Amino acid sequence: MTGFTDSYKHKLTSPENAVAQVPRKGTLAFTLGPSNPPALLSALAARVAAEDIEELHLHYQIAREPAAPLFKASFLDRLHFHPNFMSELDRKLIKEAGTDAAVDFVPSYLWQLPTIYTRFNHMNVLMATVSPMDKHGYFSLGTSCDYSSSVARDCDLLIVEVNRNMPRVFGENIIHVSEVDFIVENHVPLIELQDRPLITEDECIGSKIAAMVPDGACLQFGIGGIPNAVSKCLKNHRDLGIHTEMLNDSIVDLYEAGAITNAKKSIHRYKTVFTLCWGTRRLYDFIDDNPSIESYPSCHINDPAVIQLNDNVVSINAIMEVDLFGQVNAESLTGHQFSGVGGQRDFVSGAFRSKGGISFLASYATAKGGTISKIVPKISGFVTDSRMEPMYVVTEYGMTNLKGKSNSERALGLIGIAAPQFRDELLSEAKKLQLIK
């Protein structure tokens, strides 16, 4: 342990000194959401403000409050923003700058992102929040394995921000002190994601999906009220397994109910596995030093070829709109990038390949107080899932399986789960599109 401690002390420095090593021109990635490293990002913003950065390309997913000092229109001559999944900071920057070009989005499936960031877009620097070093000299990336563990071993400069509030997680989620160039310490609370109260539509959709989930299923939950509602309806199930992109608080509830054992899984048996985690302190404490929880890069967790190895995979994700052809938009609003693809399509594809697998794409039937239908003649945004991908599409009015259905059957099935006030209009549009006679 002495050798590791000596190495730690030798590499320990201030955020300002660590960030001073970042090249004036180059590429820099930082870890996701609750893993955004506050001290390092703040120090980098100060360096940008001092005009000590010339052309730095930032690559990231879900920039939150710790990254806010960087997101200024006045920095756009020096910083180039390249999210793979946009958040409120990106949208505010676009509004401040008055152009979508202020944020240069990088489209990619999440399972491909580690390869994108290593093979195609090499990162000069990675800045990451990690747990304290253990007696063997290892830090844990905690809540953010995703692309981070891959980039950490490929980048030219690895700077870590040690935070005792970051949980220690097993799996391919550990970094040895020998791999780190600079260490800073900053023990601040992690960002939490509070579940919003469920509404009637959530509970209606959730109960419909939960009724289709067999005991022994292997689950993937997306983010939002609908996946949370499904999990609340699964507490009496048995031998459920978890192989998911995102781990959230609903997993803790299912564990405490005795519903999760992971005993029926073919790979990572008896283990809950994920690639990113975001929730409350309760969730972070639950995964901390928990031998039944493991985290792996998204190129493993989200690879459809890996997902299919478990039987009875059930994938549950929310969408923004679906058209009468079965095309799905889950990432844009009014033609503008709003969020990102995430792992939705990865798990839709993986679930189809799984023996007995089912995927659900769920949405409220309407938006803006019932004035806008989420089932539309043709989607207005980007195609997240092509018309060949969806299986079950679900609203509070029902569900329809698009697999194996003709164009006319798809259109009629989707109209049947639209809000009643829009069905006649959708039927008329379907005729104009020559989907039905």
Image (cartoon, rainbow, N blue to C red):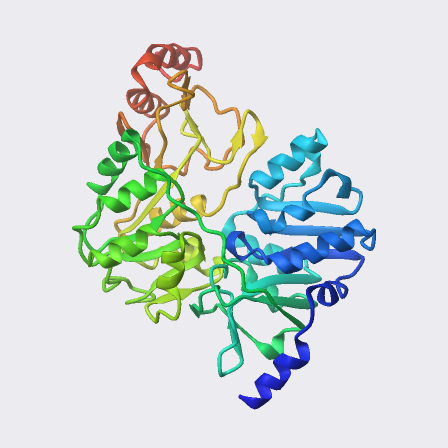
Horizontal side of residue 137 vs 319, given as left or right: right
Residue at far bottom of view: 2
Q: Nearer the viewer, residue 409 or 316?
A: 316
Q: Camera-side residue: 81 or 314? A: 81
Q: Nearer the viewer, residue 319 or 416?
A: 319
x and y percent of residue 23 in the render?
78, 61
The percent position of residue 423, horizontal first and vertical second, equals 33, 14
Where in the figure is residue 54, as x and y percent of width and height?
82, 52
Disc tally is 0
- Please say if 387 is above or below 28: above
- Decide: is 50 above or below 101: below
Q: Quadrant of residue 182?
A: bottom right
Identified at 61% across, 54% down, the residue is 116
The answer to whether 234 is drawn above or below residue 180 in the figure is above
Is residue 247 shown above or below 89? below
Q: Residue at x 62, y 50 (%)?
A: 67
Residue 392 makes an appearance in the image? yes
Tell me, yes or no, if residue 359 can be seen here: no
Query: Does 400 sit left or right of 107 as displayed?
Result: left
In the displayed structure image, the side of residue 353 where residue 38 appears, left or right: right
Q: Residue at x 53, y 81 (%)?
A: 137
- Residue 121 % position (x, y): 67, 55
